[in-house]
Image (cartoon, helix red, strand yellow):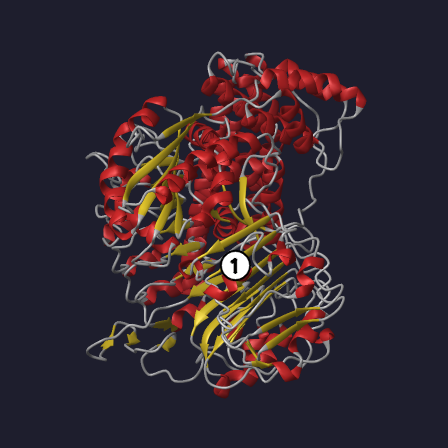
């Protein structure tokens, strides 16, 4: 980790030398000398850190270098703060003379001291024979890993060897349902529990996911719950309700509790979650995963409850899994690697985690026998004797062989909660704010970060949960043991710390702090006084916190170096003090879901801010000062309507009840939005800031606007969209008027996703009007008329993979899918089209369709005859369909059964499922 700290800091020095030349000319030679020396040290550190695990002298030397880099970073940030202070005052004589000289003198003295420390530490290499390092653990340089996966379906991604196990667990879960149906007395089921037991890394969650996806449509409602070590029962109940769209009657209910650690946790789940939710169900079936046999035995609610012990992968399955990871495009191993491959899987003892980690490592290395033999020689094979210790040693070996640029990105994942789903968009913005990402060539920092994420995935250090239709990763999670290593290594390197248990050291000088406090925390786990956090660069809060002093002015006084402040979990936060404006190095500020009603006017001082999220807060408008943040790259302001009894002026704004008004007393003209030329993401509610200069935001990649009046702003909006040629996602919901694009979107080569909710004039008849690489399209309330032929236009979109036609998107009683149309469509979702009576699939339509979902088509009489010719179809979901329609699809006896009997997976569900957002 030390070498990545050095590398990142030397890059910052290089940028500063260029950008601050006028301020630095008196000390530039010292700064350049520091940069050059650090670059030389960085080239030596990789091997030194690998040796440090076995050599106490080397470990001490590496830690001293790391601390030196942190001290140098502090000196640099103090200098930048002083420069910003001088520029803010904009007084020429002050900048030219005393203040500037004092600033330079302090920086020069600090750098001189650091250079002397470097010289002294460098002498230790020879003095203590540290520079005679053995390179025997090196596996050579990585090969390029730059291929993105195009298929978005991750539901069964690389699941090997679980077919028989998933079938056994599914039978256990469904057996109780069958027995209940046979009973005359239909009394409510108290609960049926099946536990999957196995050590970490044995594939419990993978198996549970497969079972869950296979059987969930046998139930009226379902939920998947990740059980964190510090979970709150109220949060789990809320998650269950959200996953089922707040339904009061959930019918037969399936719930998975993933990773239940101990008996106390199960008691809490039983007493405060299951016993409360059962009143809203006709019976609960529970699937839980745990590493503890004691928990599984204790969780049995009756003699019919079951326990399933995970089995090790068979040798053939282990080899297949290793081959998939190390040689994803080949059907077998190269002949010369068959023997070492066999030895590797034998030592992995049938444990999936060990196999996939080594497969990811070997994927990134040269495919030669010398490298594979080095893996066999160097990895500590103690998995069977002590699984957790052995796996952590294996993870350490994998981590040591990561490229420098990936190490801080991986360790950063340790800040997130165990078993949490990590949103990639949020993570990438955090990485950029931390300075982990540098632009390369024509690629933006966001593009580079996506490549880093894909690299981690191909190395199997993250687990993808879902992908976007263009193939990029949308959400992922990290295995518990990998997270445990990231936290341990991060604490050792003062890179991060987690506050949430008494075991968490709270007074270390870590650069980053994640707060995982809950109501279950013991006293003594509160955030320490800010004086002990004066080196903090980042603070992320993940839970409701009643004892965090984020509203106090004093809390911000020592946070002068802060770059990231993520308060998404602080739901009780009601105000931000004016002093937040002193955090001038801040690049990321997330206030999502807090109860803040206004932003202080000092927000205008945050001139380095790149990401600002005020969505789902009580802020009733966008402060004028936001439009002055010229470095802003991502702005989220999806605000709720707020009602006030009085409409009096408060602070720097005027109270209003409308979405996203521009707030500033006495100001009536639209803001100069063209100042925000760096914006990549704009997501807002409301439209009164749209003006003729909106089209100057030419760097926009994602545009999401709701509650737009097309009568007032439609022309300006559509003209502006034509200028956004780098746009990737377009999401518009409008009210009055109709959307009319003034010209073709054929030059928008990166635009892959469009979501249009509102009345349209009609679809253009020329398919070349649409973006050429459009892969995902959702239409709702568009009122497209059958007689205008919208389906013919959509069928000609050659790259379209996902199509959703929802409520009032199509007006007509017959929908025709033309011959040879939709050549690359994978997913089709038709929902709540109340007038639709007939579907017609012509010959050759949907040659690649895999997933068809029909939801609440109450007038549909039958399935189309052409459906039996769609041989690629793998899944059919029929949800909330009318009774007569359901009779026609009954297995073997229904009139429509011959049309669908070739489909491997057919799921039926009640109308309660109809609002679920099905993903493919």
Residue shown at 65% from the left, 49% from the top:
151
Give x and y (percent) for residue 917. 48, 58
- The local secondary structure at tag 1 comes to strand
In depth, the one of 862 and 854 nearer the eye is 862
Question: Alpha-carbon neighbours of circle 1 within 10 Å: few (<14), some, or many (≥20)?
Answer: many
Q: Residue at x 55, y 61 (%)?
A: 888
Residue 25 seen anywhere in this rendered image of the structure: no
Whether 276 is drawn above or below 411: the answer is: below
Residue 671: quarter of image: bottom left
Locate residue 409, reporting x and y percent: 53, 40
| Direction bottom: furthest residue | 711
Is residue 4 visible in the rendered structure shown here? yes
Residue where numbered disc 1 is placed: 878
Counting the numbered discs, the total is 1
Instruction: Out of 368 and 153, give the one closest to the viewer.
Output: 153
Question: Picture coordinates of residue 101 (x, y %)?
Answer: 45, 51
Query: Which quadrant of the view contains residue 792?
Result: bottom right
Q: Residue at x 66, y 70 (%)?
A: 840
Q: Could you say which is closer to the camera, residue 609 or residue 573?
A: 573
Left or right: 813 in relation to 865 = left
- Can you say whether 879 is above or below 559 in the image? below
Question: Percent x, y for residue 230?
Answer: 30, 37
Q: Is residue 549 left or right of residue 829?
A: left
Placement of 23 over or under 735, stated as above or below: above
Residue ID at (48%, 46%)? 434
* Left or right of 212 in this view: 459: right
């Amino acid at each position: 980790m030390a070498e990545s700290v050095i590398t990142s800091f030397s890059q910052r020095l290089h940028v500063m030398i260029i950008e601050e030349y006028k301020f630095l000319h008196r000390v530039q030679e010292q700064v350049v000398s520091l940069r050059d020396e650090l670059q030389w040290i960085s080239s030596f550190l990789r091997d030194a850190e690998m040796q440090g695990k076995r050599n106490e002298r080397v470990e001490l030397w590496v830690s001293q270098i790391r601390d030196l880099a942190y001290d140098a970073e502090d000196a640099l940030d103090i200098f930048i703060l002083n420069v910003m202070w001088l520029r803010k005052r904009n007084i020429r004589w002050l900048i030219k003379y005393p203040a500037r000289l004092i600033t330079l003198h302090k920086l020069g003295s600090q750098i001189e001291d650091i250079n002397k420390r470097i010289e002294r530490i460098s002498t230790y290499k020879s003095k203590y024979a540290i520079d005679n390092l053995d390179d025997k653990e090196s596996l050579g340089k990585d090969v390029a890993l730059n291929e993105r996966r195009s298929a978005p379906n991750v539901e069964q991604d690389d699941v090997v060897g679980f077919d028989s196990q998933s079938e056994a667990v599914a039978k256990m879960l469904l057996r109780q349902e069958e027995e209940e149906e046979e009973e005359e007395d239909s009394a409510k089921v108290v609960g049926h529990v099946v536990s999957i037991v196995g050590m970490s890394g044995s594939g419990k969650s993978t198996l549970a996911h497969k079972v869950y996806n296979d059987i969930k449509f046998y139930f009226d409602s379902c939920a998947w719950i990740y059980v964190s070590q510090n979970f709150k029962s109220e949060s789990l109940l809320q998650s269950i309700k959200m996953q089922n769209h707040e339904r009061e009657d959930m019918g037969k209910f399936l719930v998975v509790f993933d990773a239940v650690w101990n008996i106390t946790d199960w008691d809490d789940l039983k007493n405060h979650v299951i016993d409360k939710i059962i009143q809203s169900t006709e019976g609960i079936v529970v699937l839980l995963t745990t590493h503890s046999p004691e928990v599984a035995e204790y969780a049995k609610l009756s003699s019919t409850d079951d326990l399933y012990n995970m089995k090790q992968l068979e040798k053939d399955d282990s080899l297949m899994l290793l081959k998939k990871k190390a040689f994803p495009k080949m059907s077998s191993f190269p002949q010369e690697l068959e023997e070492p491959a066999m030895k590797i899987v034998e030592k992995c003892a049938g444990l999936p985690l060990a196999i996939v980690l080594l497969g990811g490592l070997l994927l990134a290395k040269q495919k030669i026998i010398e490298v594979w033999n080095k893996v066999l020689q160097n990895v500590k094979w103690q998995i069977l004797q002590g699984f957790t210790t052995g796996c952590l040693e294996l993870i350490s070996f994998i981590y040591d062989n990561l490229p420098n640029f990936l190490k801080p990105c991986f360790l950063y994942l340790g800040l997130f909660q165990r078993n949490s789903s990590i949103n990639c968009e949020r993570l990438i913005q955090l990485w950029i704010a931390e300075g982990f990402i540098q632009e390369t060539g024509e690629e933006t920092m966001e593009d580079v970060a996506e490549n880093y994420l894909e690299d981690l995935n191909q190395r199997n250090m993250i687990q993808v949960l879902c992908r976007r239709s263009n193939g990029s990763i949308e959400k992922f999670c990290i295995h518990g043991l990998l997270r445990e290593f990231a936290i341990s290594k991060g604490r050792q390197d003062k890179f991060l710390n987690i506050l949430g248990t008494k075991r968490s050291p709270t007074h270390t000088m870590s650069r980053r702090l994640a707060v995982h406090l809950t109501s279950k925390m013991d006293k003594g786990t509160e955030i320490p006084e800010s004086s002990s956090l004066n080196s903090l660069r980042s603070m992320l809060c993940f839970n409701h916190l009643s004892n965090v002093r984020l509203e106090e002015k004093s809390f911000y006084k020592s946070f002068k170096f802060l770059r990231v402040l993520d308060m998404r979990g602080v739901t009780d936060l009601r105000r931000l003090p004016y002093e937040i404006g002193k955090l001038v190095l801040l690049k990321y500020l997330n206030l999502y879901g807090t109860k803040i009603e206004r932003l202080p006017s000092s927000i205008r001082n945050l001139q380095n801010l790149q990401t600002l999220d005020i969505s789902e807060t009580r802020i009733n408008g966008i402060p004028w000062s936001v439009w002055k943040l010229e470095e802003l790259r991502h702005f989220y302001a999806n605000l709720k309507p707020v009602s006030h009894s009085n409409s009096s002026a408060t602070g720097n704004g005027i109270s209003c009840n409308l979405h996203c008004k521009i707030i500033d007393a006495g100001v009536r003209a639209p803001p100069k939005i063209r100042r925000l030329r760096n914006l990549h993401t704009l997501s807002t509610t409301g439209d009164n800031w749209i003006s003729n200069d909106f089209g100057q935001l030419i760097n926009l990649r994602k545009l999401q606007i709701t509650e737009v009046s097309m009568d007032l702003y439609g022309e300006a909006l559509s003209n502006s969209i034509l200028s956004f040629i780098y746009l990737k996602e377009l999401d518009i919901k409008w009210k009055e008027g109709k959307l009319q694009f003034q010209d073709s979107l054929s030059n928008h080569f990166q635009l892959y996703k469009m979501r249009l909710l509102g009345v349209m004039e009609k679809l253009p008849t020329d398919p070349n009007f649409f973006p050429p690489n459009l892969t995902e399209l959702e239409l709702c309330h568009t009122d497209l008329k059958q007689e205008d032929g919208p389906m013919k236009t959509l069928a000609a979109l050659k790259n379209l993979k996902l199509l959703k036609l929802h409520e009032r998107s199509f007006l007509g009683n017959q929908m025709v899918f033309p011959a040879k149309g939709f050549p690359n469509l994978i997913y089709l979702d038709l929902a709540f089209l109340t007038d639709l009576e007939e579907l017609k699939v012509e010959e050759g339509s949907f040659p690649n369709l895999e997933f068809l979902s029909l939801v609440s088509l109450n007038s549909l009489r039958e399935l189309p005859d052409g459906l039996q010719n769609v041989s690629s179809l793998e899944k059919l979901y029929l949800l909330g369909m009318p009774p007569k329609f359901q009779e026609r699809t009954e297995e073997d006896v229904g009139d429509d059964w011959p049309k669908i009997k070739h489909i491997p997976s057919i799921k039926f569900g009640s109308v309660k499922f109809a609002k679920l957002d099905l993903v493919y």
